[in-house]
Image (spheres, helix red, strand yellow):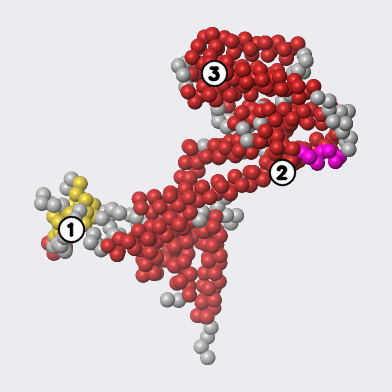
Amino acid sequence: MSFIAIVELSIGMIFAWLLLSVSAMFIQEWLVSLLNWRSTMLESTVENLVSDPVMKNQIYSHPLIKGLHSGANSEKKPSYIPSSQFSLALLDIINNSSKEAYLIQCTLYDIKTEISGKKPKNYKQIITTLNSAIGLTNQAMSADAASPLAKSILDEVKAVIRNISAEYPIVKPTIEKFFREYGTRKKQLDELLAQPASPATQNNIALNRINNGVAVLTLTNPGLKQALDALIIEMKDLGDKTENQITTAKNSIEAWFNSSMDRLSGWYKRRAQVLSFIIGLTLAFSFNIDSFQLATQLWRDPSVRQIIATQATSIVEQNPNGLNQVDPNQMLSVYMQLNQLNIPVGWIGSPMQMDSQGAVFFADNFQKRCSVRPVSSVEIFGLRLGDQCYPIINTPELNDLAGWLFKVFGFLVTAAATAQGAPFWFDILKNLINIRSAGTISDAKATKTPVQ
């Protein structure tokens, strides 16, 4: 076999894997969207980052992050959060964590989590009322803690909680338990804030608020406090320049968040590759795409090799910048054209007419019976549907165990190739087409060289 033939064989195989990878990519995107993988994995990562589901909920309900939600009533959580918005939201929550409204909000989230686990009668109504109370605490945190407005809002929140206890006695023990804990935390908070500020921050209101907020996390989220202590320790070395201190804290939190997003990206890619392999294996089995059988056919049929190489060249020329935006109609057109070729793909062949006894007639009155379990040469492996026999094609004999094992291995090779992704195969295909073009030109020149 010539060098060009080997290149065309490689192009044919890689083009087939490229088409499968594109199909798997569309299916994978649909599944990922359906299962909300990105948003779910991001939410899980944020919760691990802040060491507390309550803090995660507070971040997601913050206006800076809430604006990234989508769908009706903003029920769809974001699949991406910019690090700058995350750091600003977290710093804002920390700034307000020394307020009574913050402690009440943490208590409401604890109540909501326990009730969500038990799901008592009238569960939805209770959760709706709790969500409205949590929204009121957000308003209270945005106001000055000592203002009449903040006090009025908190009085309204406490009234809502009392109404829930009275209207739904089944959740009264849960509410009483968490508000006893709230009373203890409130007393500890007052004692904590009564302590004098450190000399380095006592004249710096903004920095003092951050330090107080981080200190309050000792009561509500000690894991996050320890992380923030390590992140913002540099602020103490920047003198009295508040802008530098706040910027340093913000940048440290952004770097911390970006580091977690890098790990999330690696986790997502590994998970997506496993899904791609499963999709590839499903496609290989569903459409009987055996890489070894396909390679054998391309080896034997030069005309099929050349047609596929031409199709592959056309795809590469129409997408000079890669497959960043795949045109489904273009791919469908390629599928339709390749379907006309003699390619060993699919389980079922063209239907053949049978007589009343299930016999299929061939030339010279030769006949074979249609059977799903052929045991002799006068039977054809096929499915009987009505008066039609649908032959099972591209398979070894039923009793050929080695042949079937080899076919399964061919399916696995197809799945593994599909999992590599369309961009991987497109780049290799482009290089092979360049090699084929250069080889074709060289052969043409050699043919035109006069014989001396």
Which x, y percent locates residue 212?
A: 77, 28
State the predominant SS element of the stretch in magenta.
helix
Q: Which residue is mark 2?
A: 255
The amino acid type found where label 3 is placed reads Thr
Which x, y percent locates residue 317?
A: 55, 58
Q: Which residue is mark 1?
A: 374
The span from disc 2 to disc 1 (Cα, nearest Å) is 67 Å
Locate residue 286 relative to residue 175 in the image: left or right: left
The secondary element bearing badge 3 is classed as helix
Q: Residue at 66%, 20% (x, y): give it.
A: 184
Picture quadrant where residue 100 is located: top right
Q: Residue at 48%, 75% (x, y): give it.
A: 3
Nearer the N terminus, badge 3 or badge 2? 3
Label annotation for residue 174:
3
Q: Is residue 232 magenta?
A: yes
The secondary element bearing badge 1 is classed as loop
Q: Residue at 13%, 52% (x, y): give it.
A: 358
Viewer-nearest residue: 261 or 151: 151
Q: Is residue 86 magenta?
A: no
Label annotation for residue 144:
none
The span from disc 1 to disc 3 (Cα, nearest Å) is 69 Å
